[in-house]
């Protein structure tokens, strides 16, 4: 028998909206939750979260306040707010890919070293995320502490290869074009060391697993686990989804949510809208930080509306507005927005590379990456009622089954000897 597992989690940013610390705390095995910035439930933040005040706040402040979940009110949280705020400010700057890569490496190393200065408490398991766990993993291994790595996106060298290809295809589109730099090469090596140190690796999809195996990571130490929960409690299955009430000759309401950049496949969605412009009536809204040049996007103003960054707390209204969700990403882990759209009752058009849990032809359609024609055809199929959309009850049962299986698998991995 082994002693009871106590888990420390190193969590830079708001990855997966704190799914793992929430679950670890719920199970009673969370020792310490380390993060950069966390908007605790103090009196000032409670006041700012008042709906009458919150709706008047700037988007940047709303985003900071969203770094909070009530389920962690009693958890042992150690955060480094100055690191987090400086990191967030850097991300908002229009800097080169070289500068961004340099800054990320600095922040990742600082984060690990700040944790080590605080100490790992009574933890005998350390849970970390790709690119930000090397320093703490090296220390943990020296102390006989089990290391679990969460690879939230495809392996680094694969990501780089596919982004270089996109920059060639859509030359001149990026505000800050992706290029290979010394810092990016260091990040590849950093992730490789994390893979070697990890006792077990968790990833969100078979797509991510295949990218790891292709670089020599042993398949036996990798487990695919989809998301086990979503943060937005207001997202709920809607009875009035496209399968129930979208009528012939009414416009199709199309939604995309995520970074408006090449990795998310935005140009392919925009081109698909041009293809169907005179074939069906539609309105398209694109929500997310815009990282593409204005002059490139302006030519699509006649087929879509760019909303910019939207606080997550306000996404529910957009899911309820939409008839269909499109997410043509070329490189993900297991994109949370597809879960949110699914549980909101929306049919989804996405790619295998998005790591989505949708069932092709049931919950929506899975199309090849880089294929505007396929996206356009599936949008028309949704409009014309050619998707055999499942009942609300069936979809709810499917989601509940996926979530429960994910939670069971996660618990088994972190508590195993």
Image (cartoon, rainbow, N blue to C red):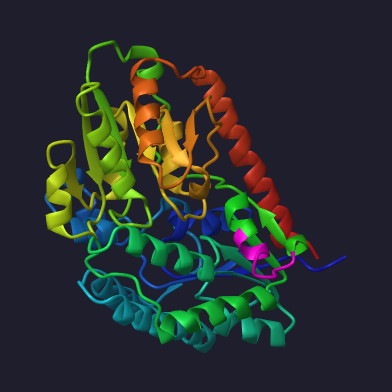
Q: Quadrant of the N terminus?
A: bottom right
Q: Residue furthest right?
A: 1
Q: Nearer the viewer, residue 408 or 290?
A: 290
Is 239 covered by the magenta stretch? no
Position of residue 303 relative to residue 118, above or below, is above
Residue 197, picture quadrant? bottom right
Q: Residue at x 23, y 12 (%)?
A: 249
Residue 212 among magenta residues: yes
Residue found 55% across the figure and 57% down from its top: 20
Is 74 left, or right, of 210 in this rendering?
left
Question: Picture coordinates of residue 126 (x, y %)?
Answer: 63, 72
Badge count: 0
Residue 373 percent coordinates (x, y): 37, 35
The answer to whether residue 260 is visible is yes
Residue 387 is situated, as x and y percent measured from the top left of the image, at 46, 19
| Viewport quadrant of the C terminus | bottom right
- On screen, residue 360 above or below 32: above
Q: Is residue 175 left or right of residue 148?
A: left
Magenta-drawn segment: 211-218
């Amino acid at each position: 028998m082994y002693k009871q597992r106590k888990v420390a989690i190193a969590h830079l940013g708001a990855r997966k909206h704190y799914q793992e610390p929430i679950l670890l705390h719920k199970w009673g095995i969370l020792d310490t939750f380390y993060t950069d910035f966390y908007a605790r439930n103090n009196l000032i933040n409670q006041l700012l979260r008042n709906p009458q005040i919150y709706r008047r706040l700037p988007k940047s402040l709303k985003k900071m306040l969203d770094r909070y979940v009530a389920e962690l009110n009693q958890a042992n949280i150690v955060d480094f707010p100055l690191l987090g705020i400086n990191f967030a400010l850097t991300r908002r700057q229009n800097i080169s890919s070289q500068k961004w890569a340099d800054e990320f490496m600095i922040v990742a190393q600082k984060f690990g070293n700040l944790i080590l200065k605080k100490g790992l408490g009574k933890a005998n398991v350390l849970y970390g995320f790709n690119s930000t766990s090397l320093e703490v993993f090296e220390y943990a291994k020296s102390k006989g502490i089990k290391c679990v790595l969460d690879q939230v996106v495809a392996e680094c060298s694969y990501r780089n290869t596919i982004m270089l290809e996109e920059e060639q295809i859509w030359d001149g589109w990026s505000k800050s074009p992706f290029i290979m730099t010394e810092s990016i090469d260091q990040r590849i090596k950093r992730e490789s060391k994390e893979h070697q140190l990890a006792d077990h690796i968790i990833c969100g999809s078979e797509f991510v697993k295949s990218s790891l195996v292709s670089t020599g990571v042993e398949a036996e130490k990798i487990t695919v686990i989809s998301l086990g929960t979503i943060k937005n409690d207001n997202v709920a299955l809607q009875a009035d989804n496209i399968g129930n009430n979208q009528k012939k000759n009414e416009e199709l309401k199309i939604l995309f949510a995520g970074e408006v950049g090449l990795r998310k496949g935005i140009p392919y969605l925009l081109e698909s809208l041009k293809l169907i412009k005179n074939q069906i009536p539609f309105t398209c809204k694109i929500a997310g930080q815009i990282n593409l040049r204005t002059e490139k996007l302006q030519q699509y103003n006649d087929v879509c509306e760019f909303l910019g960054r939207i606080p997550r707390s306000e996404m529910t209204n957009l899911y309820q507005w939409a008839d269909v969700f499109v997410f043509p990403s070329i490189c993900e882990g297991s994109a949370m927005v597809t879960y949110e759209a699914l549980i909101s009752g929306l049919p989804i058009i996405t790619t295998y590379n998005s790591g989505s849990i949708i069932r092709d032809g049931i919950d929506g359609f899975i199309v090849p990456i880089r294929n505007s024609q396929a996206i356009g055809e599936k949008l028309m199929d949704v409009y014309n009622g050619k998707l055999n959309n499942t009942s609300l009850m069936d979809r709810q049962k499917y989601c509940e089954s996926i979530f429960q299986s994910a939670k069971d698998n996660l618990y088994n991995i972190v508590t195993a000897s």
